[in-house]
Image (cartoon, rainbow, N blue to C red):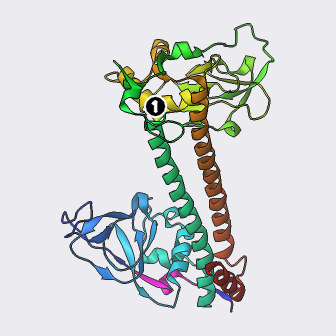
Amino acid sequence: MNWEQVALSKVIRLTNGKSISSDYSENRTNEYVYPVYGGNSILGYSRNYLIDYQTLVIGRVGEYCGNVNLVDGRIWVSDNALYISEWLRRCDNTFLYYLLTYIDFNRYSDATGQPKITQSLLKRIKPQIPQNREEQTAIATILTKVDNVIQATNNSIKAADKLKKALMQNLLTGKLKPDGTWRKEDEFYEDEKFGKVPKGWRVKAVKNVFHVNQESLPSKTNPEYEFNYITIEAVSTEFIAYKGCPTYKFKEAPGRARRKINNGDILISGVRPNLKAFAIYNNPNNLDWICSTGFYVLTAKEKENNQFYFYQILSEIGESQFHSYVAGTNYPAIGDSDIKKMKLLAPQYEEQCIIAESFQKLSKEVNRKKSKIKSLQRLKESLMQHLLTGKVRVDVEKVNEVLKAVDQ
């Protein structure tokens, strides 16, 4: 069967939701059990329901205009959203969900310039739709499979982050030994700042563990000297966006492009430390790299593991100290003396390395999964572009055979 270009107004009829007033709860309770869908997604729970069937809820106006949710069962729809109240031709609801998401109603504006969905807009939008409902279902199933893998990968990232947080609280403070056993009460001594500290561990200031801002480009640097430049914006927690970094000759470079960096150096953004724009620099291409003077560059001294201390700085140990430095100030920034006096827990070097390796493995696994999600999202975008427009036709029988094999 072929595809047909048809106005959406001949496929579905949309109805406005109804105001829920203030009679709803933000959290689900024994009394408030029915999800309330607004323009974006669930905004709370109601004691009553408006509809009781599978449908699509679509943001009606403004920022969330065109945001689509596939819902099933008893729900309430607020007046910030629309829902399909009637199907004028047989369609697979999941296929419609992906089709309407791909259409992106937010691109369409009314006379006021405000994105808004109306029945007249539905008449103007005329997508291609397969006449064969089995083909619609096959397309929807392929896209759903990709979404399911994305969701499962996201869930595994959340689990890994949760494990990492727990390890930060216990491994980095010495409560948990690298072998997985817990230290006993008599294996700690009392420190005035950290409380219980494992025997054999010391409390050190950053300046005793690292060289801080060891090297900078001098003003007499060769004007033709060329380098890649890491800006504050290029760094987020544990990540440096090397690909987006500009290249400069010294004579053309911004005045802040001065800080020399070497492999393994820790970059700590001095502005808004609560955002944790902290990362470890590893040269991605064997070219020269310089970072902004907005960073504090920490170079580990001999027999000090940079990874171990980096995760301490990311943890509650660093977080609480950064907060104390900027609390009550109008401009949340840390100074040179602040970073140098920051206190860290220091076990023997061998134990630092074992603990650091645990975090490195977790971080690599999370980064691998994040890369996988990006690849899947690109795949989904490509599939939507080709499958939802009929550019690539789906062999329904082959898809059903493959899906049957996958489910066995």
Q: Position of residue 352 (x, y in %)?
A: 57, 28
SS type, badge 1 = loop
* Residue 58 spot, x, y in % from top left: 42, 70
Q: Residue at x 51, y 17 (%)?
A: 206
Of 191 and 251, nearer the camera is 191
Residue closer to the observer: 81 or 393: 393
Task: Inspect the magenta stretch and tell me whether residue 9 lies in it.
Answer: yes
> Is residue 178 shown in magenta?
no
Instruction: Point out the image quarter for the C terminus.
Output: bottom right
Instruction: Depth check: give the residue in front, 196 or 233.
Output: 196
Q: Residue at x 44, y 38 (%)?
A: 182
| 207 horizontally vs 395: left or right | left
Give above or below for 407 relative to 186: below
Q: Which residue is denoted by mark 1 in the rendering? A: 174
Vertical order, 295 against 382 (above or below): above
Question: What residue appears at the point 37 percent right and 73 percent down from the top-left corner?
Answer: 82
What amino acid type is highlighted by mark number 1?
Answer: Gly
Residues shaded magenta: 6-14
Residue 287 in the image: state x and y as whole percent: 79, 28
Image position of 68 (left or right of 5):
left
Hey, which quadrant is residue 79 in on the image?
bottom left
| Up-down relation of residue 37 to residue 132 (above or below) | above
Can the viewer see residue 14 in this picture?
yes
Position of the N terminus, as image quadrant, is: bottom right
Q: Is residue 63 above or below residue 51?
A: above
> Looking at the image, which is closer to me, 113 or 196?
196
- Image x and y of residue 197, in percent: 41, 25
